[in-house]
Image: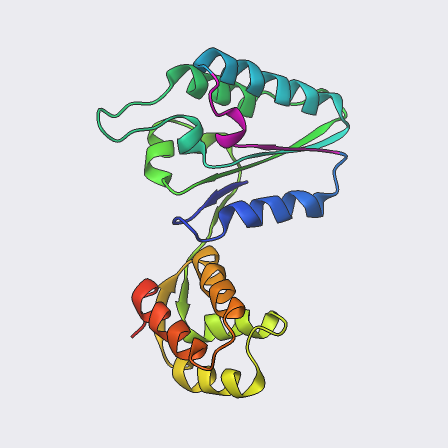
């Protein structure tokens, strides 16, 4: 699977959740942060080891998060690590040994870039992760969360949000909700609405 979506749209969380739902005995989460400080050669060696270990298991799942960061992509030039790119291409295309299955999930916010680099062609399915676009989406998230706002506050939010348009990723929304959850004063709902107007462009 290739998961595409804007920053803070929840790609990483969804990829991790999907991997856990697979219940495969071998799960590996690969990010640029886990290879912070690695040389280009060390990154390639680590990626190779991850996939070699995955091929040893009957059922394996590897998540490669934020591919553009792992490639050290920079738009000026453009510049990227060609060695890491070629390593990933080979690893993505290499089939597991007979009788074994490997499920690969990759995430990115930059479809065009990775398409030009030839990485999208390695995946059989592309999933688009969109930002939330309406107040109803926000209300649905709030209703799924326990004890975030009390009943009176929720009724007020329903009046304010039910017909609004927004553009916000789930990660950014959860951050705003957590700030509101920590506050105990009566003005927290008003501040939450103000933050939505600022961050989500609510109209």
Q: Which residue is drawn at 44% across and 53% down?
A: 9
What is the x, y in percent for residue 59? 74, 32
From the viewer's perspective, tell me whether residue 58 is left or right of residue 128: right
Residue 168 drawn at (x, y percent): 39, 61
From the viewer's perspective, is 27 left or right of 143?
A: right
Most foreground residue, 104 or 187:
187
Q: Is residue 142 above or below residue 49?
A: below
Could you tell me which residue is drawn at 63 percent across and 22 percent down?
50
Quarter holding the C terminus? bottom left
Taking the view exactly as shown, the residue that stands out farthest to the top is 41
Choose top left, top right, bottom left or bottom right for residue 60: top right
Residue name at image x 75 percent, y 42 percent: 23
Residue at (42% x, 14% y) in the render: 83
In terms of depth relative to the viewer, which is nearer, 92 or 145?
A: 145
Where are the magenta residues, as a range?
26-38
Seen in the picture, residue 54 relative to 39 is either above or below; the reply is: below
User: What is the x, y in percent for residue 29?
Assistant: 60, 34
- Kindly indicate the quadrant of the structure image that contains residue 119: top left
> In the rendered view, would you say 34 is above or below 186?
above
């Amino acid at each position: 699977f290739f998961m595409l979506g804007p920053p803070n749209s929840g790609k990483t969380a969804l990829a991790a959740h999907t991997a856990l739902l697979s219940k495969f005995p071998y799960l590996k989460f690969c990010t640029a942060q886990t290879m912070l400080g690695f040389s280009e050669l060390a990154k390639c060696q680590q990626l190779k080891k991850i996939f070699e270990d995955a091929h040893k298991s009957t059922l394996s799942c590897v998540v490669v998060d934020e591919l553009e960061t792992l490639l050290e992509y920079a738009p000026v030039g453009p510049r990227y690590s060609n060695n890491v790119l070629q390593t990933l291409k080979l690893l993505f295309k290499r089939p597991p040994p007979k009788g074994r299955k490997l499920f690969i999930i990759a995430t990115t916010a930059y479809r065009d870039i990775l398409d030009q680099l030839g990485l999208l062609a390695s995946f059989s399915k592309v999933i688009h992760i969109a930002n939330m676009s309406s107040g109803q989406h926000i209300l649905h998230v709030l209703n799924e969360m326990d004890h975030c706002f009390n009943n009176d506050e929720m009724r007020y939010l329903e009046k304010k949000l039910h017909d609004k348009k927004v553009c916000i990723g789930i990660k950014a929304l959860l951050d705003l909700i957590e700030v509101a959850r920590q506050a105990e004063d009566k003005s927290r709902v008003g501040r939450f609405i103000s933050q939505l107007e600022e961050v989500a462009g609510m109209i």
